[in-house]
Amino acid sequence: MRWELLYALQQRDLEGRSGLNAIYLRILYLKLRAASVESLVGQEACGWDAKMHANMRGFLKSIQWHIDEGHRQWLGPESQDPRLVLFRDLDLRTNRHTQYKTRALDLRKFSHEWVSDSLLGWVRATSRSPGEISIVERAWKIADAAIPQGRHDPRDLTISDMDLAIRAILRHSDNPQYQKKLILGIKKVLEHVRADERLRH
């Protein structure tokens, strides 16, 4: 774990990142040492699940990204879980690619495998904006939790299933504009799945 932290700090330095907060680093190190953490590879924000200041969160995400990226380069791209889609590997519709290099679409968190497969096909089909991806991901996380288990294919969805998903979205936010964006996010992926199926047949 010490070597991973040292590597991440060196990479931040090579990037010319300024403003290393020694207090943040000490807090993180003491927490990890107390928990007897041996490696941070694959963790979420260095395993920190408590609420924190935005600056601390940014520091943790930066450290985590450098550790995971170093591990990924060492193992080679073929070792990467295909369900963890890095924004840096996508054809993003943005002029600020460096801003999103630490972001990822984590399809491992979905309970329905067909949802993960559908999202993977949708996000790789054409150029997407980071904001669009985030909205669609949020929409389908809500729908994934609402749709009953036992649905193994988008074609298995019933009107009742979609009603459950829409109701969950409406409960999630009372902002009509945001609700509309989330519902559109559901529609975009289902339309892509249907179009892809028509092409296959």
Image: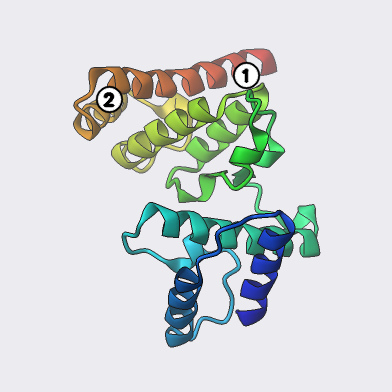
Q: Position of residue 81 (x, y in %)?
A: 65, 53
Q: Nearer the viewer, residue 130 or 78?
A: 130
Binning the other alpha carbons within 10 Å of mark 1 as few (below 14), some (14 to 19) or many (20 upward) gives some
Residue at image point 79% right, 64% down: 74
Q: Position of residue 13 (x, y in %)?
A: 69, 62
Q: Nearer the viewer, residue 162 or 185?
A: 185
Residue type (three-letter) at the residue carrying disc 1: Asp
Binning the other alpha carbons within 10 Å of mark 2 as few (below 14), some (14 to 19) or many (20 upward) gives many
For residue 76, above or below residue 184 = below
Secondary element type, mark 1: helix
Q: Quadrant of the C terminus?
A: top right
Residue type (three-letter) at the residue carrying disc 2: Ile
Q: Nearer the viewer, residue 175 or 145?
A: 175
Q: Position of residue 47 (x, y in %)?
A: 46, 67
- Using the image, tell me which numbered label, if any, was put on residue 166: 2
Q: Are marks 1 and 2 in contact (CB under 8 Å)?
A: no
For residue 64, above or below residue 31 = above
Q: Position of residue 71 (x, y in %)?
A: 71, 64
Instruction: Identify the image quadrant of residue 93.
Output: top right
For residue 127, above or below residue 26 = above
Instruction: Identify the image quadrant of residue 40.
Output: bottom right
- Using the image, tell me which numbered label, if any, was put on residue 138: none
163 to the left or right of 26: left
Q: CA distance from mark 1 to mark 2?
A: 24 Å
Tell me if I can see residue 82 in this picture: yes
Q: Which residue is mark 1?
A: 196
134 to the left or right of 65: left
Residue at image point 66% right, 34% down: 97
Tell me if I can see residue 44 in this picture: no
Instruction: Identify the image quadrant of residue 143.
Output: top left
Q: Earlier in the sequence, mark 1 or mark 2?
A: 2
